[in-house]
Amino acid sequence: MLVDIDTWVLDLDNTLYPPAIGLADQMNVRIRAYLTKLFDADEGETRRLQAQLVAEHGTTLRGLMNNHGIDPHDYLAWEHTIDYSVLTPDPALTSALGGLPGVRYVYTNGSAYHAEQVLTRLGLTDHVDGVFDILAGELVPKPYAASLDAFLTRFGIDPERAAMFDDLEVNLTLPHERGMTTVWVSGGTPYEQLADRRWRASDLPEFLRANV
């Protein structure tokens, strides 16, 4: 059971909705289209570049800024071309989040615009108390310490009383070290405890109903 938790930190993409929805696939297609235009590269080369930038800098955007000085706002403009209609309200998740004690924040490497579109389509806007996006973090993404520290400071969060949910395990390492309870949202069983204050869940609503 998750006890003494009054702050719920939620990643956005592939955490509040399953990867099978395909929204992240749309995002990757548009990112690679941006890389193709920028570097006049073919599909294979853009995939290699994207993987390299993410591995070395955390996100494609940060890598392009560090290595090529691109305008982040120009880069993020592709988010406005995504078909968000693939997302529909999730009553089970709405109920589970609505029943949580305390406050709920979205912490994402995407933009606030992207978060707003996703939360609106999922019917979760009224159940989120704040959004911390890539611009709020001064374009430093998860899993870097500067991003996490800025997020914790912005909302005055006590890590010992917070639980963080993310589909990327690497994004949960530092929060766990800081004392947060972490939940890796991925495949496998509906939920299991991996270690003290570390969980894994494939069904976020079921996990919350069973452990809060």
Image (cartoon, rainbow, N blue to C red):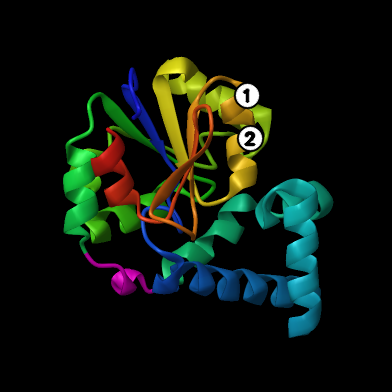
Q: Are marks 1 and 2 in contact (CB under 8 Å)?
A: yes
In this view of the protein, which residue sits in the foreground, 162 or 117?
Answer: 162
Amino acid found under the numbered disc labelled 2: Thr
Which residue, as the protein is rendered here, is positioned at the far bottom? 42
Classed neighbour count for the residue bearing mark 1: other residues with Cα under 10 Å, few (<14), some (14–19), many (≥20): few
Question: Where 18 falls versus 107 (above or below)?
Answer: below
Please tell me which residue is depicted at 83% across the width and 52% down the height of the picture. 67
Q: Position of residue 114 (x, y in %)?
A: 41, 55
- x%, y% of residue 198? 52, 34
Residue 70, relative to residue 47: is it above or below? above
Q: Is residue 169 visible?
A: yes
Provide the secondary structure element on which disc 1 rests.
Answer: helix
Q: Residue at x 45, y 35 (%)?
A: 164
Q: Nearer the viewer, residue 2 or 119?
A: 2
Rendered-image quadrant of the C terminus: top left
In the picture of the structure, the residue carrying the numbered disc 2 is 173
Q: Residue at x 41, y 48 (%)?
A: 191
- Pick the residue in front: 201 or 76: 201
Queried whether the magenta region covers residue 62, the answer comes back as no
Q: Which residues are magenta?
A: 82-88
Q: Name the side, left or right, on which 197 lies relative to 129.
A: right
Q: Examine the rendered structure and indicate whether residue 148 appears above or below residue 117.
A: above
Q: Nearer the viewer, residue 175 or 45?
A: 175
| Residue neighbourhood size for the residue with mark 2, other residues' Cα within 10 Å, grouped as few (<14), some (14–19), many (≥20) | some
SS of the residue under disc 2:
helix
* Residue carrying label 1: 177
Q: Position of residue 22 (x, y in %)?
A: 44, 73
